[in-house]
Image (cartoon, rainbow, N blue to C red):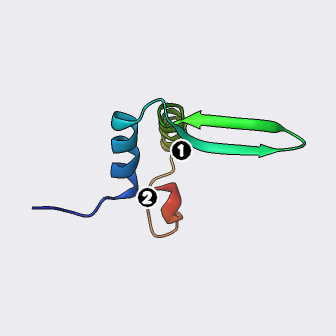
């Protein structure tokens, strides 16, 4: 049975299939250019998630959906 791809599934799949491809590209004249591969992006996501959990933040009705 197929199920919809969730944002977390998307990240895991992208890391597995395209670890070195550019996931995020940001650039401007002040700060220069920043590039993150899917692997780097995934590592940053997991670090943020663990930091939030370590701070005692859990998913609830008061927590923004994007933070869960």
Q: Is residue 9 left or right of residue 67?
A: left
Q: CA distance from mark 2 to mark 1?
A: 10 Å
SS label for mark 2:
loop
Across and down, in percent, residue 17 comes to 34, 36
Q: Position of residue 14 (x, y in %)?
A: 39, 42
Query: Image height check: is 67 above or below 50?
Result: below
Q: Where does residue 32 sit, x and y in percent of width and height?
A: 82, 37
Exactly how many numbered labels are in the figure? Answer: 2
Q: Nearer the viewer, residue 58 or 68?
A: 68
Q: Give the labeled residue for mark 1.
A: 52
Q: Are marks 2 and 1 in contact (CB under 8 Å)?
A: no
Q: Name above or below for residue 36 compared with residue 68.
A: above
State the residue lying farthest toward the right. 30
Which mark is on residue 19? none
Quarter of the image with the N terminus is bottom left
Graded by Cα atoms within 10 Å as few (under 14), some (14 to 19) or many (20 or more), the crowding at tag 1 reads some
Crowding around mark 2 (Cα neighbors within 10 Å: few <14, some 14 to 19, many 20+) is few
Where's the C terminus, which quadrant?
bottom left
**Residue placed furthest toward the left:** 1
Q: Residue at x 43, y 31 (%)?
A: 19
Tell which of 7 and 13 is nearer to you.
13
> Mark 2 or mark 1: which comes first in sequence?
1
Q: Secondary structure at mark 1?
A: helix
Give me the residue at 48% from left, 64% from top.
Answer: 65
Q: Quadrant of residue 30?
A: top right
Numbered tag placed on residue 59 in the rendering: 2
Whole-percent x and y of residue 42?
A: 47, 37
Name the residue: 49% across, 35% down.
21
Q: Is residue 68 above or below residue 54?
A: below
Instruction: Name the residue nearer the viewer: 45 or 36.
Output: 36
């Amino acid at each position: 049975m197929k199920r919809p791809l969730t944002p977390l599934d998307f990240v895991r799949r992208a890391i597995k299939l395209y670890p070195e491809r550019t996931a995020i590209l940001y650039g401007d004249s002040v700060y220069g250019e920043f590039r993150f591969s899917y692997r780097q992006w995934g590592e940053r996501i997991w670090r943020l998630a663990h930091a939030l959990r370590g701070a005692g933040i859990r998913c609830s009705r008061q927590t923004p959906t994007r933070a869960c």
